[in-house]
Amino acid sequence: MKRRGRPLWLACGLAGLLSAGVLAAPSAETATLRPTFGGVLLEAHLLPGSAQSLTGVWSDTGHAKLLRCTPSCQVVKEIPLTGPLTVSQSSPYRVVLGGTFKVGKRVKVLLRFGQSDLIAVEALVTATPSR
């Protein structure tokens, strides 16, 4: 973007763009993994920053399935983000990692937002199974 012939970041200043959320980095809060059939369900509150979608999730066991569950679950290539979103058993979008996970273990999970924003979060595998 340009403003009067100058790039927007130069016209507003980097601090102004960060405070306006234009260059805000995505993040994930309160990440946990709940046992489910054949793997674990990621439960996390996602703050997309300037990203428009969650496009991939990985752990040591491999690539996770991104699901849209309205009315039944179907695999999707991305989860659209128009603002903060909680992914969980009760949300319309879910993230499921296949494999065997030990309760009480902390697992590093890598999330990709859009085509370039990568963040790593640490999630605790809890004992309570999802229903």
Image: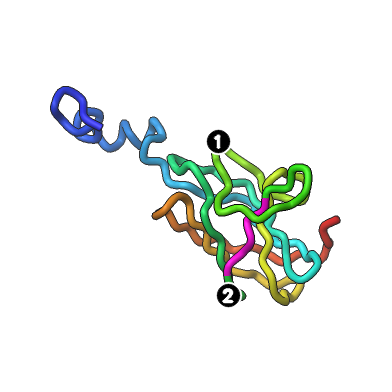
> Callout 1: few (<14), some (14-19), or many (20+) C-alpha neighbours within 10 Å?
few
Instruction: Read off the magenta span.
Output: 63-67
> Residue 101: image x %, image y %?
72, 74
Residue sitting at x 65%, y 70%? 106
- Image quarter of the N terminus: top left
In the image, taking residue 3 as reference, residue 98 lies left or right, namely right
* Residue type, mark 1 in image: Gly
Residue sitting at x 78%, y 65%? 35
Residue sitting at x 62%, y 41%? 85
Residue 40 marker: none
* Residue type, mark 2 in image: Asp
The residue labelled by disc 2 is 60
Disc 1 secondary structure class:
loop
In the image, taking residue 111 as reference, residue 4 lies left or right, namely left
- Image quarter of the C terminus: bottom right
Quadrant for residue 8, please give it.
top left
The residue labelled by disc 1 is 83
